[in-house]
Image: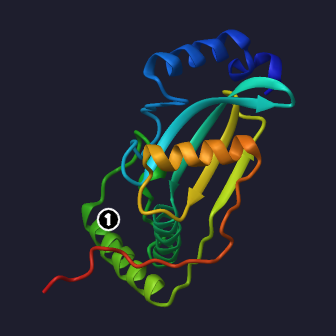
Amino acid sequence: MSKKNNPGFDPKEVQLLKDECKEANQSFMYFEDEDLQEPNGEEFAHIHFVGLHKGQEIIYDLVIYTLRLHHGSKVYEMAEQKAMKSYPLYIPLDNRNEDYQANEELDDEVEVMILELIEEIEENEEVKVSEHIEIDEDFEYGIGLDVALNVEEITDEVVLKFIDEFKSGTLKLDKTLYSFKSEFDDED
């Protein structure tokens, strides 16, 4: 998308966000998006903030989440792909449209298999993740930032620290590879 057609580069849009932030007495605003499957919560947040890009004030559209959530997502994707090899007729939830014909028996079998595969993948530490930032300058609203941090939860303090370090150019990401285990282990 050209910068001219990107509302996140429009000085009027930028000023609106700055005014919202000033009114709320903070440097960023949470953004609620019905299209995102993960609502703002302990492990995830969708944020808008104003920053400089090539000397111009623009809006950054930040999706920030814990490394644990990122790992869980990658593990689930891997388990689902493995399960689909055994059940080629299975259609993942994300791929189902209005024409989808429900097959509860198949869905139940695949779900059980996915849970078993998740346990196996985690046990074998097949998926490892590190902190990262992806910058999308061709984003539809400002510049998109996709960030995973090795923190227990995404709090205002975590977001503020990230924004301050990002803006000042002092952001240092931990490149150590981590693996996590699900917290829903048997509690007998």
Task: Please name the residue shown 35% across and 82% down the image.
Answer: 116
Task: Please name the residue shown 66% across and 17% down the image.
Answer: 14
Residue 102 or 184: which is nearer the viewer? 184
**Picture quarter with the N terminus:** top right
Residue 25 or 154: which is nearer the viewer? 25
Can residue 181 be spotted in the picture? yes
Judge from the rendering whether residue 121 lies leftward or rightward of residue 172; answer left or right.
left
Task: Determine which residue is flagged by label 1.
Answer: 107
Task: Please name the residue shown 44% across and 73% down the image.
Answer: 87
Query: Residue 94 location, x and y as percent?
Result: 46, 51
Instruction: Judge whether 97 appears above or below 102 on screen.
Output: above
Mark 1, Cα crowd under 10 Å, few <14 / some 14-19 / many 20+, is some
Which residue of the protein is positioned furthest toward the bottom in this rendering? 124
Residue 82 or 13: which is nearer the viewer? 13
To which quarter of the image does residue 118 belong?
bottom left
Which residue of the protein is positioned furthest toward the right in this rendering? 54
Which residue of the protein is positioned furthest toward the left in this rendering? 188
Task: Please name the residue shown 73% across and 46% down the image.
Answer: 135
Query: Residue 103 location, x and y as percent?
Result: 30, 59
Instruction: Judge whether 12 appears above or below 100 on screen.
Output: above
Can residue 2 be spotted in the picture? no
Residue 155 or 69: which is nearer the viewer? 155
Q: What residue type is labelled 1?
A: Asp
Judge from the rendering whether residue 55 lies leftward or rightward of residue 123; answer left or right.
right
Which residue of the protein is positioned furthest toward the top in this rendering? 12
Question: How many marks on residues?
Answer: 1
Instruction: Judge whether 52 appears above or below 10 on screen.
Output: below
- Secondary structure at badge 1 equals helix
To which quarter of the image does residue 148 belong?
bottom right
Query: Residue 171 location, x and y as percent?
Result: 70, 54
Query: Residue 80 location, x and y as percent?
Result: 47, 69
